[in-house]
Image (cartoon, rainbow, N blue to C red):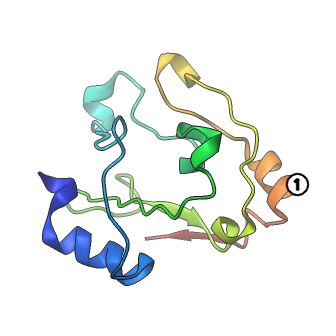
Amino acid sequence: ALWSHSALLNTARQILGDHVDVMGHPVWNLRCKTPERHSGGTATVPWHQDTSYLDEESWDKLQVTAWVPLVDTHRTNGCMQVVTGTHSKGITVEHACCVGGTWYNECLPAELEATLDCDMAADVVTG
């Protein structure tokens, strides 16, 4: 399975340490992002924190998530964007569920800025 591939596990162990069990989430171990032209307008993944998909009891556990594109990506076809440093705050902002008839969670940029003290104009990294 992709999520148990040695390259991903080795990367996770570099972050978490060698003496930590690494396992996939029992539900969210694979999320497909369909190309926009095939999605009926539901392909854009809104701003979210991965912790919004997890039970609050697990928020204090070390977790690594990986985005693995299966095609070449660039700014115009949907590459990953992150807000620098917000993961280290230890705070999960309020999210709305099932945005646009999808199963995506969403947090508004203004909520990210207010709660996590970030600047969405300056702190977003696209790559």
Left or right of residue 87, residue 17 in this image: left
The residue closer to the viewer here, 78 or 48, is 48
Name the quadrant containing residue 117.
bottom right
Farthest residue to the right: give it. Answer: 114
Point out residue 127 in the picture as x, y percentages from the top left corner.
43, 71
Left or right of residue 43, residue 104 in this image: right
- In the picture shown, does residue 73 fall above or below 96? below
Point out residue 126 in the picture as x, y percentages from the top left corner.
50, 68
Residue 108 seen in the figure: yes
- In the picture shown, does residue 64 fall above or below 40? below
Residue 47 seen in the figure: no
The residue closer to the viewer here, 86 or 54, is 54
Name the residue tied to disc 1: 114
Farthest residue to the front: give it. Answer: 19
The residue closer to the viewer here, 19 or 16, is 19
Left or right of residue 43, residue 59 in this image: right
Element marked by disc 1: helix
The residue positioned 18% from the left and 74% from the top of the image is 7
The residue positioned 24% from the left and 69% from the top of the image is 8
Q: What's the amino acid at mark 1?
A: Ala
The residue positioned 74% from the left and 67% from the top of the image is 89
Point out residue 98 in the picture as x, y percentages from the top left corner.
55, 22
Point out residue 74 in the picture as x, y percentages from the top left corner.
34, 64
The residue positioned 25% from the left and 57% from the top of the image is 69
Say few, some or many: other residues with alpha carbon within 10 Å of mark 1 (under 14 / 14 to 19 / 20 or more): few
